[in-house]
Image (tube, rainbow, N blue to C red):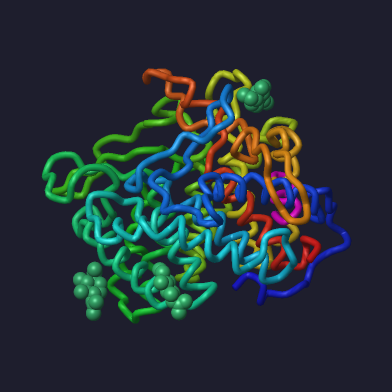
Amino acid sequence: MYFLRAAVVAIALQLSGVANGDVIEDRILAKIYGVATKGKTNGVVPTPTGWPEYVIGTATSYTYQSSGAWTTGFFPGTLWLLYQRSLTKTLKVSSVELLSLARTWQAPLRANKDRTDTHDLGFMIHDCFGWDAILTGNATARQTVHDAAIALSQRYNSVTKTIRSWGSISDTGSFTVIIDNMMNLGMLYWAAQQFGNTTLSDIATSHATTTMNNHFRTDGSTWHVLNYNQVTGAVTAKYTNQGYSDSSTWARGQAWAIYGMVSAYRWTKNTAFLDTAIKAADYFLAGLPADGVPYWDFNAPVTGLRDTSAGTIVASGLLYLVEQAPAYKDKYLQRAIDLIDDTIALSQSPPAVYTASPFAVSDIGFNAFLMNGTIDNNPAKTHTAASSNTGLVYGDYYLIEAQNRLLGMGLLAA
Ligand SMILES: *[C@@H]1O[C@H](CO)[C@@H](O)[C@H](O)[C@H]1NC(C)=O
Ligand SMILES: *[C@@H]1O[C@H](CO)[C@@H](O)[C@H](O)[C@H]1NC(C)=O
Ligand SMILES: *[C@@H]1O[C@H](CO)[C@@H](O)[C@H](O)[C@H]1NC(C)=O
């Protein structure tokens, strides 16, 4: 759908290796394709039983999660994003093969669609089946997204006016909402539009409004976690789970906030959501170090630890903002391109070893394209090598999505 927006901008922008970088594109493709076809036997990729999540800094291989984990939709999602790109430009892997791989990797995830015990169905279902429905019109995929939207909406509470993040819907005690939950609203809006069910979009807008009012500080920064009282609807605590401290701003949380508010604006055209996204984006951009790649938390004592995934989420979110509010092109387009370029310059992993024709990957090396992602570095928690300085499947997902948006604007060479 981005591609319909056609070439408009160009020339004055500083297009770097990223914006016309077939070398980078091949390197990304080699990583994703290599991981996707790892188990291929007699020409067939077997039904997956684990989904790539992170690569610890000292390893090369992905650590895999079972199908119920919140991150499972991203790997098939990256295959769909590459499929989307292949419809516009010739890649070294055919559209037919990318589509087949995406379906293979997403198929078992369909079992998650009716779950009411998680708020992450947007990531798990919408980021793969949603692309299938949008890009191919597949009826099963479309119905899968609908069912997941209905399931997610069961977590909405009409007193707190939010969707519950953690815990069970029957829990009458704690009621937590994390800023990440903004990312699941797009699925509700899309399903509402497709199936004419305004209850779903009303729930999404209610959640976005409550989050806008309670999760943001006056300077545009955000808290990660809020507790609500289910009887009065009052906020009872504001704190962090993955960030540095309760008063700090966790970079990926801020990234989810920006992207999620753009999404709420896209579907409602309520300028309060756009203004909130802009304020949050300006906070994020002002807090970047000189090399342009975000630290994992804006208020942590500087240790040099990055979260490249926060950078790619914001790059895609800013391009989404420019798509939805073209008046902001001058303000944000170059910043988004810089985020992509700077992240690749600092954190591109060593390239895979591959042959171009036929495209074959003999050694993937570090399985993710980007290094230096941070899952979590809260000092109150027990950290493992998996917590920080890792490759993250979602860091790569949003990088590819951001590049597709540039392609859709005519800014990535077709
Ligand atoms: C990125 O990760 C690699 C691998 O762990 C590490 O060697 C490098 O120092 C990291 N770079 C930054 C800027 O953190
Ligand atoms: C839709 O996707 C399903 C797999 O989820 C597949 O079995 C089916 O063939 C697809 N339908 C079409 C028309 O391609
Ligand atoms: C619309 O969504 C609401 C909220 O999940 C649900 O209760 C209702 O059954 C849906 N309506 C239809 C016609 O599916």
Q: Position of residue 253 (x, y in %)?
A: 47, 41
| One can see residue 66 in this view | yes
Q: Residue at x 52, y 54 (%)?
A: 259
| One can see residue 324 in this view | no
Quarter residue 11 falls in = bottom right
Q: Residue at x 84, y 56 (%)?
A: 13
Quarter residue 9 falls in = bottom right
> In the visual, does 400 lie left or right of 145?
right
| Location of ligand 2 given as a quarter of the image | bottom left
Q: Position of residue 334 (x, y in %)?
A: 76, 52
What range is drawn magenta here? 332-339
Taking 91 as reference, is 181 above or below it?
above
Residue 335 highlighted magenta (yes or no) = yes
| Main SS of residues in magenta | helix
Q: Residue at x 46, y 59 (%)?
A: 104
Compare residues 299 and 213 and report the one nearer the observer: 299
Taking 116 as reference, is 376 above or below it?
above
Q: Position of residue 145 (x, y in %)?
A: 37, 67
> In the visual, does 212 lie left or right of 393?
left
Taking 150 as reference, is 347 above or below it?
above
Q: Position of residue 118 (x, y in %)?
A: 28, 49
Extreme-bottom residue of the structure: 196
> In the visual, does 411 lie left or right of 242?
right
Compare residues 286 and 389 and report the one nearer the observer: 389
Residue 306 highlighted magenta (yes or no) = no
Compare residues 256 and 345 and report the one nearer the observer: 345
Q: Residue at x 47, y 26 (%)?
A: 386
Compare residues 90 and 124 and report the one nearer the observer: 90
Tally of marks: 0
Quadrant placement of the C terminus: bottom right
